Image (cartoon, rainbow, N blue to C red):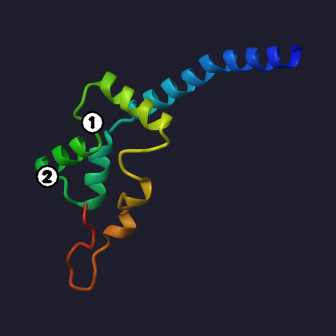
Amino acid sequence: MRFVRYVGYRLVTALPVIFGIIVLDFLLIHLAPRDAASVLAGESGAATPAHMDELRHKFGLDQSLGMQFLTYVSNMAHSTSATPIATIPTSAACISNDSGRRACSC
């Protein structure tokens, strides 16, 4: 009985720590000097205002900060993300091909 009580106590005391880590992670992402849309648009070379708005909508950056946090926590709880990291094109994927056109599709 003491072991079950001890494990329960440790789990309950771990919850505020886990919540603090989630909040800190979310805030660090949003305290970056540029938003994700400008970074992705800059890497793809397509930093037009329309493309930036499309990226902000795709990643939910056009929502309020509270709604973004709730979506972030919900995605973490369900082990999902809005866009899998493997599908986000990198600068290596945006290198010009032989015809001189951009190979990036973002």
- The mark found on residue 5 in the picture is none
Nearest to viewer (mark 2 / mark 1): 1
Q: Amino acid at mark 2?
A: Thr
Between 54 and 3, the residue placed more toward the observer is 3
User: Is 75 on the left or on the right of 94, as rendered?
Assistant: right
Residue 75 lies, in percent from the top left, at: 43, 37
Q: Which residue is mark 1?
A: 61
User: Is 8 on the left or on the right of 67, as rendered?
Assistant: right
Q: Amino acid at mark 1?
A: Leu
Q: Which residue is mark 2?
A: 48
Tell me the quarter of the picture where residue 74 sits: top left
Tell me the quarter of the picture where residue 42 sits: bottom left
Q: What is the CA distance from the residue labelled 2 to the residue labelled 1?
A: 16 Å
Q: Residue furthest right?
A: 2
Residue in the image at 33% along x and 30% along y: 68
- Give the position of the N terminus as an image quadrant: top right
